[in-house]
Amino acid sequence: MDIFDVLTMIGGLCLFLFGMNIMGQALERCAGNRLQGLLGKLTTNKFLGMLTGLAVTAVIQSSSATTVMVVGFVNSSLMTLKQAINVIMGANVGTTVTAWILSLSGIEGDNVFVQLLKPTSFTPILALIGVVLYMFLNNSKRKDLGLIFLGFATLMFGMDTMSDAVSGLKDVPAFQQLFIMFKNPILGVLAGAILTAIIQSSSASVGILQALSATGQVSYGAAIPIIMGQHIGTCITAILSSIGTNKNAKRAALVHLSFNVISTVVYMTVFMIVKMVFAPVFLDMAADYLGIAVAHSVLSILSVALLLPMAGLLEKLVCKLVPDAPGKEPEKKVELDERLLATPTVALEQCHNVAMDMAQSAAAALLSGVRSLSNYSDELAQYARDHEEKSDIYEDVIGTYLVKLSTHQISDRDSAEATKLLKIIGDFERISDHGVDLVISAEELRNKKLNLSEAAMKELSVLSEAIQEIMSLTLRAFTDNDLEAAQSVEPLEQVIDGLKETMRTRHMIRLQQGGCSIETGFAWSDMLTNLERTSDHCSNIAACIIDVAQNNMNLHQSTREVKADSEDFRKQFNAYAKKYQI
């Protein structure tokens, strides 16, 4: 083996790691909605949680990514520590899928059908299809599918390149001595752990071991301890991701490490006893691609079988290792954890959940402001201000998070959803501002000892009821993605516009007839403006929801079309106009 073989091996390794990364990211984007559904069905049932972790990891091809995601979920209180333990155990089994895929490279035989199963036979076709899908089509789903094919073809090409480059090592005495040395189980575990910690992927390190097995110098006696060490080394990613998290998230990362360390210690002890007492012949046999995949899967399944029944004890262990500080208040949950950005679809769903909390706060501020016009109290005024301040904080947090999310590669659907949320949170924030402005108008009347006329109060009560209904429709449209409710907002908004103009005209008449003072008129004008602008923001939110549902982000295009030729719009408008007569 010369310097050119070394360079070829390095190039093959780089292609292998790059292909695995590209394929995993594309798989994650394609499986976004399914991934979200799987994680949403988590229960405290051990078996279901374990299957969830297995399925998610099998899809995204990375137990490290799954574990980092779990740390983020626990840090955001989306998942309990008990649920996290089961998912992490399942992830350890799910990651073995990659080794089985790579074992296809070891298929040998002269039969045509057997040859067709070899990656070198079909990956060129997949690469061609991938290039066509990625370069010549605009649909993001098809582009991601193309990246999956290209990533798979790249990693398999890198695998074959590595295998060919290292094949000459079988005649190098130093290489033979290296793997004889690794027959010492302790050294094998250390080698596997260090390599995996460096590249932060047990799937990749198993692939490298499979490539080295092409030399015929890797025995099962050396491979099995290395695989055990790889299970420990892959924990480094979760440990690093837990830095700066709350105690439960740190415990989730420690569960991953404890699970792999305990299972490795137990089975390493069993392995050494079997080796010394029985000295099985197969330990000296040369491992191949398939054998390493089998060993990887068996060790992972045995680890889960050992510790899944003891998940409760594992939870108690990490709680003792990371104890709660005595007398300290419980840690606040992190609403939007940046670790979730690694899975954009899940991060976006959490953004939507937080935005729903913001919508409730904005509505609370607005409705408190409306009630204060007829029944003012200091408690009600403070309640409106508290929720307005909360809405401001929400807008800043969600907006900043969505900007960070936009730097990641996300699907067209997720991009449209992110754009919708960015627009909508601005409208909800302004609604909360109008709630406080109404409180200020009520305080102005109270402090100056001004009273609205009986006719004005009756008109105001009608407009207030209309505002409460449009706010309720808007909340339902946003929180439930209810298109029927969204389509009912615009007709009511038009009725509210008409009410405002009518009430302003009537105020001018009362002013001329001496039934109202100029000072009262200023406060009246402010109240009408704030109430009418609230309905405008509700209209913006409803229009945005409809636009996204129709894959059209042209602001208000949908509402213009509805008003132009919709019989339903006219019926709803007439019904609301009749309901809110003054």
Image (cartoon, helix red, strand yellow):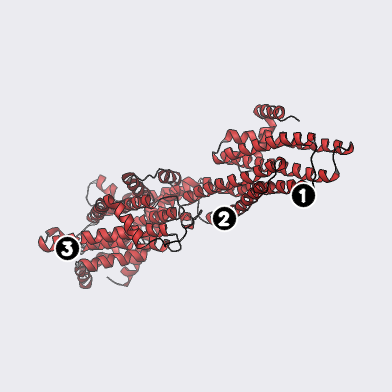
Q: Circle 3 sits on which residue?
A: 272
Q: Amino acid at mark 1?
A: Asn
Residue 448 position in % (x across, y down): 80, 48
Return the disc, 3 or 2, that comes first in the chain's sequence. 3
- Viewer-nearest of discs 3 and 2: 2
Q: Amino acid at mark 3?
A: Met
184 vs 409, left or right, is: left
Question: Badge 2, how many Cα within 10 Å: few under 14, some, many 20+?
Answer: some
Quarter of the image with the C terminus is: top right
288 vs 567, left or right, is: left
Residue 307 position in % (x across, y down): 27, 53
Q: Which secondary structure lies at badge 3?
A: helix
Q: Circle 1 sits on which residue?
A: 447
Residue 33 position in % (x across, y down): 45, 44
Camera-side residue of 572 and 195: 572
Any mark on residue 397, and which?
2
Camera-side residue of 285 and 233: 233
Q: Which residue is at 31% across, 61% downward?
A: 205
Question: Badge 3, how many Cα within 10 Å: few under 14, some, many 20+?
Answer: some
Return the disc, 1 or 3, that comes first in the chain's sequence. 3
Q: Is residue 226 above or below residue 312?
A: below
Quarter of the image with the N terminus is: bottom left
